[in-house]
Image (cartoon, helix red, strand yellow):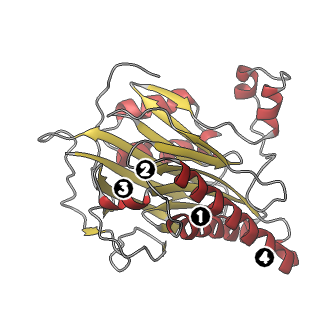
């Protein structure tokens, strides 16, 4: 049986008192603890609507930042799933994501205009839109999406930040930028007048690929070598995400840390089999969502689905395939 295993975790880190990040997994927006889900490649919900997974990192101080990231993901969820995709081409999905980004941006700008104490609120976003065939990568700001394959990682997004701009302009080399102190000056985010959502088709997926969505609280603390080593040492996406969050905290945990991992593989016999005996598994339906920690369920369309949410189970095993394109 072919399928996807998804696991997300968000953590306040070691320094901050408030978590301004939120994650979107299985139509739940949350900023505490973890959440996972499983669904087959032929899942009817995936084929009809696509599935959205994302990380948002709030800007604007404790109250404003946390609110901005939550509203951003809620707006993406509501607009994306409420938009007719119109066939199997990617055009409908691109349009749905574009409308979702515009709605989130309007929502944040309107609230900031109405409440002076939220005047500087905003949010980064990065995510993956899975479709029946392939996937789209989208982002605004410095939250990232990586693809890991055969022990090698590739960043699929380009940060909207002054540091990335310095690299593209030739003022810094990629190595100099990597070795420099992290810069949190972003040039694009949800909740700004110049907001732009970058959307691009992902590289052709292969069995064994891992897509990783994360906030800067992770990638500022851990380099690509650590990510690659963590994938090689992990038996499933749960172990992978936990290793990354724990690693970022061990490195200082200077910021909130959020990660969503999506694993795709070919399952046969005991290899990669879902072993969720220690946890409850339920069908993905509005009244049967399973979450660890605080979460905000968003009503799903009335479509039956084989997708399942899994809290903290061993759900993924990785086997290399040739090539690193």
Residue 76 numbered tag: 1
**CB within 8 Å, label 3 to label 1:** no
Q: Is residue 299 left or right of residue 38?
A: right
Question: N-terminal of the two: label 2 or label 1?
Answer: 1
Which sits earlier in the primary sequence, circle 2 or circle 3? 3
In 3D space, how far apart are the residues under numbered discs 2 and 1 (Cα atoms)?
21 Å
Camera-nearest label, 1 or 4: 1
Residue in the picture at 66% in, 52% down: 255
Q: Which residue is mark 3?
A: 47
Image coordinates of residue 206 in percent, x first then y, are 36, 32
Mark 3 vs mark 1: give the one in front: 3
Foreground pick, 194 / 14:
194
Label 2–label 1 contact, CB within 8 A? no
Mark 3 and mark 1: span between their CA atoms?
Answer: 19 Å
Say if residue 197 shows up in the picture.
yes
Residue at the limit of the structure toward the left, as seen here = 269
Which residue is painted at 30% across and 55% down in the image? 39
Query: For the residue labelled by badge 4, is the local secondary structure a helix, a strand or a loop?
Result: helix
Few, some or many residues within 10 Å of mark 2 (<14, 14–19, 20+): few
């Amino acid at each position: 049986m072919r399928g996807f295993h998804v696991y997300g975790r968000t953590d306040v880190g070691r320094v901050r008192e408030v978590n301004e990040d939120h994650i979107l997994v299985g139509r739940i927006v949350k900023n505490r603890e973890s959440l996972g889900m499983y669904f087959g490649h032929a899942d009817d919900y995936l084929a009809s609507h696509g599935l959205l997974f994302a990380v948002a990192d709030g800007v604007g101080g404790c109250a404003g930042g946390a609110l901005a990231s939550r509203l951003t993901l809620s707006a993406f969820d509501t607009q994306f799933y409420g938009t007719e995709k119109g066939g199997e081409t990617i055009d409908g999905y691109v349009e749905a994501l574009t409308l979702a980004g515009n709605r989130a941006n309007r929502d944040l700008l309107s609230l900031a205009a109405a409440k002076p104490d939220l005047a500087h609120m905003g949010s980064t976003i990065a995510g993956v839109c899975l479709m029946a065939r392939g996937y789209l990568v989208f982002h605004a700001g410095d939250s990232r999406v990586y693809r890991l394959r055969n022990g090698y990682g590739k960043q699929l997004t380009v940060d909207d930040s002054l540091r990335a701009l310095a690299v593209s302009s030739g003022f810094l080399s990629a190595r100099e930028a990597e070795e420099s102190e992290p810069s949190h000056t972003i040039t694009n985010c949800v909740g700004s007048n110049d907001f732009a959502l970058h959307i691009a088709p992902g590289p052709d997926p292969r069995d064994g690929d891992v897509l990783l969505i994360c906030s800067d609280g992770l990638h500022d603390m851990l380099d690509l070598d650590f990510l690659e080593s963590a994938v090689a040492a992990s038996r499933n996406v749960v172990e992978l995400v936990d290793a990354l969050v724990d690693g970022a905290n061990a490195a200082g945990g200077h910021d909130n840390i959020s990660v969503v991992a999506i694993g795709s593989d070919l399952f046969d016999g005991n290899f990669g089999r879902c072993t969720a005996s220690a946890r409850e598994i339920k069908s993905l339906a509005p009244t049967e969502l399973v979450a660890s920690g605080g979460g905000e369920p968003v009503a799903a369309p009335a479509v039956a689905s084989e997708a399942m949410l899994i809290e903290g189970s061993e759900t993924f095993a990785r086997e290399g395939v040739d090539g690193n394109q």
